[in-house]
Amino acid sequence: MTVYRKIERFADPQTSKTPAQKEPDPDLGNDFIPKERYTSPEFMKLEWERLWTKVWLMGAWEGDLRNPGDYVTHKIGNEHIVITKDENHQYNAFYNVCSHRGNQVAYGKGGNTDTFRCSYHLWEYNLRGELIHVPDAETFPQGAPCDKLSIVRLPCDSWGGWVWYSLNPDAEPLRDYLGMIPEHLDPYHFDRMTLINDVTVEWDCNWKTSVDAFNETYHVFGTHPQLKTMLEDMDVQIDCYERHNRYLIPFGCVSTHIEDGTMITEELKDYMRMNMLDPDTYKGDGLGVRRAVQLNWRKISRGMGYDFDDLNDDQLSDDYHYLIFPNITMNIHCNSVMVFRQRPHETDPNRMYYDLQNYALIPNEGTDAAERGSVPVRQVRSEVPIGMERPEHRQFKHGEESIGEVLDQDASNLAMVQNGMNSTGYRGLWISNQELRIRHFHKTIDDYVHRNPIKWM
């Protein structure tokens, strides 16, 4: 049996604003997870009826809704949604559909408008989706009452710098749905971050195949060999909550799969540079890099315009990695967050949309970093442009553009995995303890899709 090194944790569970304590692992069984939930149109239909139309969903970045009249369009399944900021500075969400003949009322990705006017017959709606004008209203013998013909509104709220909505008119309050998430993640102050990368990639896999890929570190050693000398993939803390889950990945160290943890590799040197620590002046070995990065951030952060007082020491080096059920994956570092929003295809369980957004913490005004108009953003070996202007959204199919070395490696597996899921010779997922988050994810899906416990649990 292989003996692995233990990674020292420097977060004090008693004082950390983001709870750092290990949660007990739930007993979720160990049988196969059925493959049909990745391939079956019937299961896809159940997911839509019982999951997607019941949960809260991330709809828009608040930075795209700064001014009254700003709006963003969003798509989930076959539904098109409009999210607005009205003249009272309130957020609204409603279906992008005219009550007359079903045409859309908002066009493009977003913009600014005083009203929404259907391009077909010029029915007009305000920023809350309320009908305000019907041309030739007198020709409708049944009348055209605005209160009856306004667009159906959806529950809408904000947290973390994003606007959320639910297709469930009776949805519980957003904060109740998020549960422990605000307590855990508010110390990062996402609302102080700016969007620096925004793409959608069309992948030939089920949306859950993508979620699974980022819900475990078991694949790191085989899929991302370059990372084994800059982060830990074995001694990773996994915590499961009611709906959501996380793992805490130590960065700035050599994987405990490797016997010699003292080495300082080029990847580790790159990590040090990304975190403003000069490897040429560093005097220790590989075992001390992670702690040196943490202490260095404590030393230099205020001078760079950052306030990390709400973060524990481990958050200055590590990836606090969260799944907000059902489809939001967050790789969170002290001065950046990488967000994955995984959306199902409209009709095909073997396809999906992968929204990748990168956000960077904006330095306080009056600091050198703020004046330069750029900030050092930690990425896992991905090439993402850094800038303070909102990037243009791009959409493409897998393989047409790179989304960074690590994510390209992940994506290369997904179509092959999905093909395997459809094979008669494949029986289902056989999950290890390192993949506990996947089993918890499916257990939470079953809480929505199935009324009673199922056999594999």
Image (cartoon, rainbow, N blue to C red):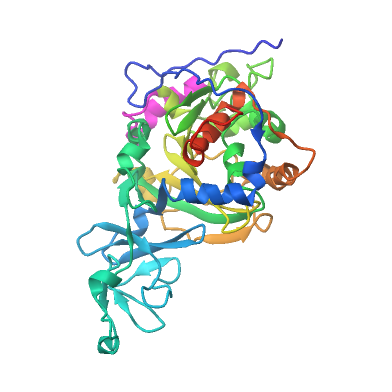
Residue 307 magenta-drawn?
yes
Q: Which is more toward the observer, 266 or 155?
A: 155
Picture quarter with the N terminus: top right
Q: Quadrant of residue 6?
A: top right
Q: Quadrant of residue 131?
A: bottom left
Picture quarter with the C terminus: top right
Q: Which is more toward the observer, 387 or 155?
A: 155
Residue 408 magenta-drawn?
no
Q: Residue furthest right?
A: 425
* Coordinates of residue 150 in the picture (x, y in percent): 29, 69
In the rendered view, tell whether residue 210 sits above or below residue 77.
above
Q: In the rendered view, does 20 fall on the left or right side of 143? A: right
Q: Is residue 269 visible?
A: yes
* Coordinates of residue 147 in the picture (x, y in percent): 23, 70
- Residue at image point 34% right, 22% down: 16
Q: In the rendered view, does 22 fall on the left or right side of 405? A: left
* Coordinates of residue 353 in the picture (x, y in percent): 57, 54
Q: From which residue to which does the magenta span run? A: 290-312
Q: Is residue 285 visible?
A: no
- Residue at image point 69% right, 19% down: 258
